[in-house]
Image (cartoon, coloured by chain):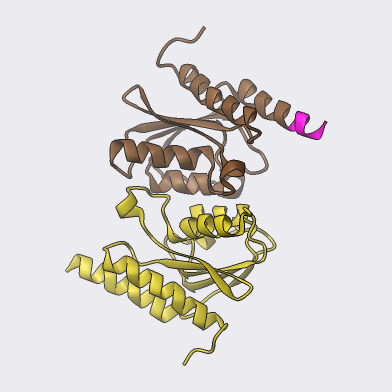
Chain colours: A brown, B yellow
Amino acid sequence: MFSVFSHEYYMKEALKEAEKAALVDEIPVGAIVVCRQQIIARAHNWTEHLTDVTAHAEILAITAASKYLNNKYLQKCTLYVTLEPCVMCSGALAWAQLGELVIGATDAKRGYSQLAPQALHPKTKIITGVLAEECGQLLSSFFQKKRS
Amino acid sequence: MFSVFSHEYYMKEALKEAEKAALVDEIPVGAIVVCRQQIIARAHNWTEHLTDVTAHAEILAITAASKYLNNKYLQKCTLYVTLEPCVMCSGALAWAQLGELVIGATDAKRGYSQLAPQALHPKTKIITGVLAEECGQLLSSFFQKKRS
């Protein structure tokens, strides 16, 4: 059972977004932005439907959160994402001066920690491995189905 | 004088975009995407007006070019940008598998070559220093006016 306002609770919400992506044949990565315990933005990967490589969950979530707050900086926000951000997304999170980043599964191939470990803002607090198994499993199943 | 289809010619077009940004008080960075000698996308930095850190010239140009081509990959395209891309934009250009990147001024502080030198796609051809002085001068003047 998830207690409200825990990292697991919010990651479960990000996972719901990822599941929505899978249903429409998008790589299942989901993200939400939380500010003062409230979810102010939700997004999932949307690159295929938009024919746009920049439409990652994190980018869409940053745009939506900034719109909601009418502020391009997200210092008081936490972004939950089911998969470790790529270089593009970590660079975007740095520009947004994100307060806290909570990551589900790691991405050994495309994750920022491999290619650009200094990409995030130095003040961003980073928490990894929240519901990592569930987050990773959703991706594995998706790619397994694709190959079969 | 600029000969048509030279890198200088196209960078001059990117500079026109950057000048438009300066006129509306946005940091003057411009980008264009060229495919088969035709300019298929033009954009400038739009972060302040959109209240969105992701609205860099390159990101907007990638989105517009992909829309035009109905293809999220830009392998046969050249992107001209007046300032060296940041980490976010270089990551986006990598996802797009950009064919060629032509850079005006370098960015010693925020450029990808400092923070994420491996961020671009390995097949992307990179040309730097095209109209570097003009591109850099536009930025210097902008920040000088801001400070005065």
Q: How many marks?
A: 0
The answer to whether one can see residue A74 in this image is: no
Indicate the position of residue A133 as horizontal and vertical percent values.
64, 22
Classify residue B123 as left or right of residue B39. right
What residue lies at 64% left-to-right and 29% top-to-bottom? A22
What residue lies at 26% left-to-right and 63% top-to-bottom? B25
Compared to residue A87, the image places residue A21 above or below, namely above
Where does the C terminus of chain A fall, quadrant-wise? top right
Q: Nearer the viewer, residue A14 or A21?
A: A21
Indicate the position of residue B38 as horizontal and vertical percent values.
57, 73
Indicate the position of residue B52 as horizontal and vertical percent values.
37, 48
Q: What secondary structure is the stretch in magenta mostly built from?
A: helix
Q: Nearer the viewer, residue A145 or B125?
A: A145
Residue furthest out toward the right: A148
Compared to residue A110, the image places residue B80 above or below, namely below
Residue A85 in which image quadrant: top right
Residue furthest out toward the bottom: B1
The answer to whether residue A7 is magenta is: no
Residue B16 in which image quadrant: bottom left
Indicate the position of residue B129 as horizontal and vertical percent values.
51, 77
Compared to residue B1, the image places residue B45 above or below, namely above
What residue lies at 44% left-to-right and 66% top-to-bottom? B108
Classify residue B144 as left or right of residue A93. left
The answer to whether one can see residue A65 in this image is: yes
Residue furthest out toward the left: B148
Magenta-colored span: A143-148
Q: Nearer the viewer, residue A75 or A28?
A: A28
